[in-house]
Image (spheres, grey):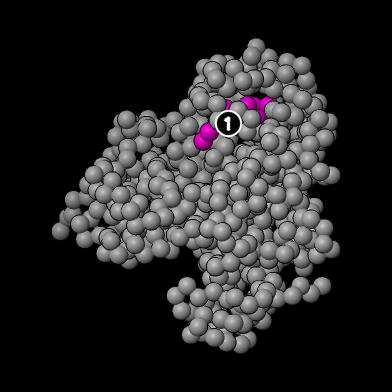
Amino acid sequence: MGLKILTEHINVPGIETLEVYRKHGGYKSVEKAIKTMTPDEVVEEVKTSGLRGRGGAGFPTGMKWSFLAKPEGVPRYLVCNADESEPGTFKDRWFMEKNPHALIEGMITSSFALGANTSYIYIRGELLFVLRILEKAIAEAYAAGLLGKNILGSGYDLDLHVAPGGGAYICGEETALLESLEGKRGNPRNKPPFPAVKGLFQCPTVVNNVETISAVPWIVNNGGAEYAKIGIGRSTGTKLISASGNINKPGVYEIELGVPVEEFIYSEEYCGGIWKGKQLKAVVPGGSSVPILPAELILKTAAGEPRLMSYESLSDGGFVSGSMLGSGAFIVFDEDQCIVRNTWNYARFYHHESCGQCSPCREGTGWMERVLHRIEYGHGHQQDIDLLVSVAKQIEGNTICPLGDAAAWPVAAAIRHFRHEFEWHINNPQEATAPGAVYRGQPAAVTA
Amino acid sequence: MAETINEVKFSDAAMAEIQRYISHYPEGRQKSALLPILHIAQAEFGGWVSPEVMDKIAEILNIQPIEVYEVATFYTMFNLKPVGKHVLEVCRTGPCCLRGAEQMIDMLKQKLNIEEGETSADGMFTLKPVECLASCGSGPMLQVRETFYENLDSEERVDAFIAHMRSLEPETPTWAK
């Protein structure tokens, strides 16, 4: 069994209660940080740990924290991004539902480090049942003097609230999230100013993912240097992976970063292999927005090295032959899945979720959905593949927020690696639209 | 001819919950509670929010009605038209489709005799397709109010789910209990 930092006690009966959570060492980091460390010392430990944002971008957390502006007399905020909406991602929901105090402990310790006296957990509205679990746990923490005025007699005050969204993928983008938290439409803001300078209520704000914040207590308890020893290279620590699709054991797995992809897919400890005895066709390793890779490129890099579950190894080869770790949403496709249909499904998703603020994204996602729809349903034109590539290119990099890129990448990657499959659909519409029809030829060769 | 418009009145429990959310935000930032209040309103008034309900929310928050409309229309969870007793929010996104979401949706359509977005003739069910609900490891799945129904991957399970829902009253949120 690999090392478990976040999930060591997750299956202990009653761990969702303060009493059991404390019995297993819970809230130690709050005492240690508040009573024996300065806020800057906590920030330093997080920097030393090499912890990177677990929501998808992988930006170093300690560095993000050190950018926080600290003007005199202006409140600062910590906001937890629990909007988990990236297709394929369900780790945060699972984690909060099972072990709410772990996130709350992370919020208190992190808020202390940042000098925040009010913090928010913004959770997607579909997870109101998780909001109730968090609110119950927060009430317990208040009653135990771990939240509120003068925490543990230290003079440090913190209020923690949970706020629900209303159903909008875009609110996982941090500035859209802040707009939503202020009771507005989730339109991303222009940057700069960055949230670290002008965030929630125009005050300096840090926005971190659930899993990122939940890793902070271990780092404070054991030291950043210890955390940095776990993992591989600049991918330090452990990561929660949401494994879904055509595998025997879908679910959330905590891995030490650096586990070989092949082991992750086939070992009994993790996914347990492809279901129904079928063959692996492809994997989207980091959530719907990252490039899909065919079986041979997910198991080995273009150079023939074993591919590892780490930020660096999954992106080895750039977008030509690599992908991204992203949010750790590992979506597995068996040999009977149609790449065209899946790409159309994702394109529909991004079209549906585009906030409409930037024309390239608002219009481009619609174009991609419609063109993919006609290919899938047997009405594709010869020039459609190039048209899709062209539209994707015109969206990428031309929008306020990364939703445009997130919409363009999966389409571009599907064509890059499975072009033959798109051509087959266009050239053989009758065959391709027959019930259960799937292209059985070779994927396109990888060209540098 | 004068029309009588029923005055929108939140229950005491709902008002207490609304005030609790408003208290989470700094002075002058009460509008921040808008999304939580829309959820409360939807649970309170039969699963949807009417223009009258939105006007009432604007009054409570001391903001313009348009500020409520523009938010309620942006977020997909808020139903702006009357819905059935149970709104089935079915996940149609990629990862669930790999495990049979399209077949589940087809079964629901056929068994309830409705298309996506429609309400059954007996007013019992509304079928609402939604995007990824963060339950990809247990798809195909759907949500009804605050409950996830997961692994609906066979006709037996879909039938059992429908029978279960027919016997159920809409879920009451914890604050109203």
Residue A268: percent from left, percent from top: 62, 45
Q: Residue at x 39, y 43 (%)?
A: B147
Q: Nearer the viewer, residue A319 or B174?
A: A319
- Residue situated furthest front in the rendering: A277
Residue A442 vs residue B12: left or right?
Answer: right
Residue A431: percent from left, percent from top: 50, 83
Q: Residue at x 63, y 33 (%)?
A: A7
Q: Secondary structure at mark 1?
A: loop
Q: Residue at x 57, y 84 (%)?
A: A426
The vertical placement of A435 against A76, above or below, is below
The vertical placement of A448 against A162, above or below, is below
The vertical placement of A180 against A278, above or below, is above
Looking at the magenta stretch, what is its main secondary structure? Answer: helix
Residue A157: percent from left, percent from top: 63, 21
- Residue situated furthest top in the rendering: A153
Q: Residue at x 43, y 48 (%)?
A: B150
Q: Which residue is mark 1?
A: A10
Q: Amino acid at mark 1?
A: Ile
Where the C terminus of chain A falls, by quadrant? bottom right
Residue A61: percent from left, percent from top: 75, 40
Q: Is residue A99 magenta?
A: yes
